[in-house]
């Protein structure tokens, strides 16, 4: 069916209770079921209780709407699609089963089943799109297009996409975004009560890829636009998603960014390079929040949550609350070092808060559980509150922070962690700071197979440790056993105050309690062995 309406008309297409079976077995480059070609019309399409089985197309798609400066409304309700495909699924230059090229698009997809599709399901191109997807199940798809495996959206202004109560299973995509790929200046994407499982992508974003960068829009009128991404992942799961590049489950490139991930799980996702679960890159202000989430056995070269902030004089907030990281793996080797949670923001003001978060049995190889590489010129804020680190292994420690920071660690436990076997690391917590303030309260380091805490300082810094304990930490290959304070140059100064702190049964080759090579340390009401060999002032150890 082909429709070519007159200019500025209104078109209604209403199809109900219809089966489309084995259409498209012809050689022409036309859509196999419906082609609607116009310029500036109001188009309304409703398909209810329809089935599409074993239809093929040579070019463009099964249903194609071209309405370049018009408005298109589409409703698909109670539909079923099985074994629809391109005639040559290995050819890159083709469009999806449903292709909409329209300035303004409004789409509702409800109660549908898509099975064994050899093509992108929905391709939307235009100025602004609002897409609502609910109660959709997609199982077994293959796509060789450059964009998303199921949904591919490219808009010049804005997009609102909501995916609720849906599942995407067993798919393979040769482009970006195994399920969804979106390129747009302004985006609100919500994924709620949905499942993504066993999806792979040859490029970034095993499941979801988002690009909202100013340099992607060369026209002067677009470059002056405001760019903003609001990503919400609520009560959803991503498992066995694979990116052969970066972002095992989700990859986001944005200017201004707001990310909220709540009550969700990321299980056994992987990326070849960065972001086994999520890769986030932002050029401007950003807030990234995780609440009540679970990360199990994800893997990557660097970072399970891997975030990079590039813009100078901007601000990034990272909030991780009630989140559990278990048995995640990093493969990076020195000189590359990352973290299960990794943030690089050397020109950005950072506020990073970890609350009631657990890191259990993570294998970081030459990296760590938390690695924050921060600015040395602006003051950043880092808080660890009621966190547990247990049986993790990583060469650069369990927590590694560098830069200028006001760091607070309170009500937290570091238990039975170690550095990579057979190597020489520094400590379980390593702080390489400049002009900083460090405060530890009610923090316990116990049974760790390495020094507990090493502070390497430049400039003028302060260290305060109150009401804490260092118990049975062992570092047989180096020093210290509990606490080390080292200066990076002779002009730097640090004042350390240690009050009501227990040092018990720590072991090291020397300096089992404290190794100090510079600075002023005041110990008040502490409990430690009285043997002077346990507190040593010397040059820093060389490994």
Image (tube, rainbow, N blue to C red):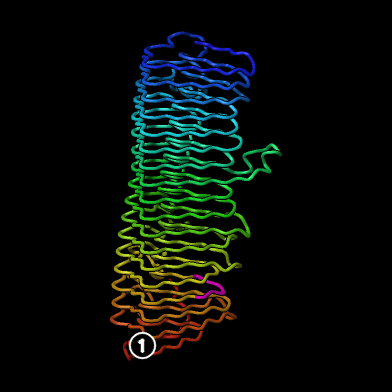
Q: Which residue is mark 1?
A: 526
* Residue that lies at the very extreme toward the right in this rendered image: 220
> Is 357 placed above or below 505 here?
above
Q: Position of residue 69 (x, y in %)?
A: 63, 25
The answer to whether residue 230 of the structure is visible from this angle is yes
The picture quadrant where one finds residue 316 is: bottom right
Residue at figure coordinates x 46%, y 13% from the top left: 32
SS for callout 1? loop
Q: Nearer the viewer, residue 170 or 327?
A: 170
> Is 360 placed above or below 9 here?
below
Residue at figure coordinates x 51%, y 9% from the top left: 28
Span of residues in magenta: 432-437
Q: Quadrant of the C terminus?
A: bottom left
The answer to whether residue 244 of the structure is visible from this angle is no
495 relative to 341 in the view: left or right? right
Is residue 539 shown in magenta? no
Q: Position of residue 411 (x, y in %)?
A: 36, 72
Q: Position of residue 114 (x, y in %)?
A: 36, 26
Q: How many marks overall?
A: 1
Q: Position of residue 382 (x, y in %)?
A: 48, 67
For the stretch drawn in magenta, the main secondary structure is strand
Is residue 435 shown in magenta? yes
Residue at figure coordinates x 28%, y 81% from the top left: 505
Q: Few, some or many C-alpha atoms within 10 Å of disc 1 (few <14, some 14-19, many ≥20)?
A: some
> Is 256 placed above or below 173 here?
below
65 relative to 236 in the view: left or right? right
The picture quadrant where one finds residue 478 is: bottom left
Q: Nearer the viewer, residue 248 or 331?
A: 248
Residue at figure coordinates x 48%, y 58% from the top left: 318
Q: Nearer the viewer, residue 539 or 249?
A: 249
């Amino acid at each position: 069916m082909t429709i070519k309406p007159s200019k500025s008309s209104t078109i209604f297409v209403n199809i109900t209770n219809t089966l489309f079976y084995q259409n498209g077995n012809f050689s022409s480059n036309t859509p196999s079921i419906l082609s609607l070609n116009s310029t500036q019309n109001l188009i309304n399409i409703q398909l209810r209780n329809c089935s599409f089985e074993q239809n093929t197309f040579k070019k463009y798609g099964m249903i194609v709407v071209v309405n370049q400066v018009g408005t298109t409304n589409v409703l698909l309700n109670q539909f079923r699609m099985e074994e629809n495909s391109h005639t040559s699924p290995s050819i890159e230059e083709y469009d999806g089963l449903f292709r909409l090229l329209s300035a303004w698009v409004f789409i509702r997809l409800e109660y549908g089943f898509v099975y064994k599709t050899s093509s992108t399901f929905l391709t939307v191109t235009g100025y602004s799109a609002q897409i609502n997807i609910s109660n959709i199940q997609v199982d077994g798809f293959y796509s060789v297009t450059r964009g998303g495996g199921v949904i591919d959206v490219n808009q010049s202004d804005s997009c609102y996409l909501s995916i609720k109560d849906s599942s995407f299973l067993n798919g393979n995509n040769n482009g970006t975004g195994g399920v969804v790929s979106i390129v747009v200046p302004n985006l609100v994407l919500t994924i709620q009560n949905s499942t993504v499982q066993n999806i792979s992508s040859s490029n970034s974003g095993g499941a979801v890829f988002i690009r909202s960068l100013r340099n992607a829009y060369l026209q002067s009128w677009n470059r002056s636009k405001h760019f903003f991404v609001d990503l919400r992942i609520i009560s959803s799961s991503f498992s066995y998603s694979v990116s052969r590049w970066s972002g095992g489950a989700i990859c986001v490139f944005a200017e201004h960014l707001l990310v909220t991930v709540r009550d969700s799980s990321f299980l056994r996702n992987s990326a070849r390079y960065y972001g086994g679960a999520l890769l986030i890159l932002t050029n401007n202000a950003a807030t990234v929040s995780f609440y009540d989430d679970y990360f199990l056995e994800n893997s990557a070269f660097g970072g399970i949550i891997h975030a990079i902030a590039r813009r100078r004089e901007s601000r990034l907030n990272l909030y991780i609350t009630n989140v559990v990281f278990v048995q995640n793996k990093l493969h990076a080797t020195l000189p590359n070092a990352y973290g299960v949670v990794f943030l690089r923001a050397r020109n950005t003001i950072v506020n990073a808060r970890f609350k009631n978060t657990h890191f259990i049995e993570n294998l970081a190889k030459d990296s760590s559980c938390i690695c924050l590489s921060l600015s040395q010129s602006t003051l950043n804020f880092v808080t660890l509150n009621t966190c547990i680190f247990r049986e993790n292994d990583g060469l650069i420690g369990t927590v590694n922070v560098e830069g200028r920071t006001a760091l607070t660690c309170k009500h937290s436990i570091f238990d039975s962690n170690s550095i990579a076997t057979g190597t020489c690391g520094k400590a379980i917590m390593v702080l390489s700071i400049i002009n900083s303030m460090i405060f530890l309260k009610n923090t316990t380091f116990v049974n760790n197979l390495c020094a507990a805490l090493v502070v390497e300082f430049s400039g003028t810094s302060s260290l305060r440790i109150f009401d804490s304990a260092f118990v049975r930490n062992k570092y047989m290959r180096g020093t210290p056993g509990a606490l080390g304070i080292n200066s990076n140059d002779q002009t730097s100064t640090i004042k350390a105050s240690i009050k009501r702190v227990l040092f018990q049964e720590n072991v090291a080759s020397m300096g089992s309690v404290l190794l100090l090579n510079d600075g002023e340390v005041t110990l008040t009401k502490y409990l430690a062995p009285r043997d002077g060999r346990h507190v040593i002032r010397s040059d820093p150890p060389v490994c």
